[in-house]
Amino acid sequence: MSRIGKAPIKLSSDLNVKIEDKTITVKGKLGELSYTLLPGMSVEVEDGLLKVKRAEDTKTQRAQHGLTRALIQNMVTGVTEGFKKTLHIFGTGYSAEVIGPWLKLSLGYSHDILLRIPEGLKVEANAVPRSRGALSDFTTIINIEGINKQMVGQFAAEVRGCRPPENYKGKGVRYHDEIVTIKAGKAGA
């Protein structure tokens, strides 16, 4: 059996899990998510544990077994705790602000970039002073929160893709825990 797929998922008492045909719906304090099971997968709930089972022992079914269990675990985590990604914008004149359903990014291009915030995501953009208090030493922090892990990660990747961090000065958009290695530059400088 798949090591990930055979692990049971603990369900807390405030969760409501409904299984109809091949669709599993998980409802919690933050919202509701549903997933349609792949062919050959089945789900059982007993004693506060959710177990994913597969019909056959083929290579494809073993891979889908672990995938299905991981997706259902992400649904359970999403409706109970939620997911959050934090991005930092470094660079003089670089900024971000939320305007209605849009995220406006000023990243050194000749134009501003407008990204539509997907339904179900909460996005905040705040300018925070860095170690020194000078105006140019402000960094913008973007917080992306939601119950769907895939949507949170996808939108964070889209924002980062607008101006990935470069290796010479470190300017650009990066994840909170991302480490950018700064190159030395030209030897004569």
Image (tube, helix red, strand yellow):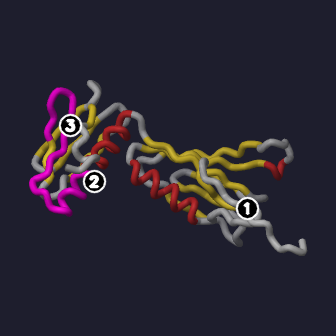
Identify the mark at residue 67; answer none if there is no mark.
2
Q: Position of residue 7 (x, y in %)?
A: 25, 40
Residue ID for mark 1: 182
Query: Residue at position x 20%, y 56% from top?
Result: 62
Q: Position of residue 93 (x, y in %)?
A: 77, 59
Three-letter code, disc 1: Ile
Q: Position of residue 54 (x, y in %)?
A: 14, 51
Residue 23 within the segment the image draws in magenta: no
Q: Where 155 sits versus 189, above or below? A: above
Residue ID for mark 3: 50
Three-letter code, disc 2: Leu
Which segment did they paint magenta? 44-66
The front one of 187 and 135 is 187
Three-letter code, disc 3: Leu
Instruction: Specify the farthest residue to the top.
Output: 13
User: Between marks 3 and 1, how big is the CA–CA gap?
Assistant: 46 Å
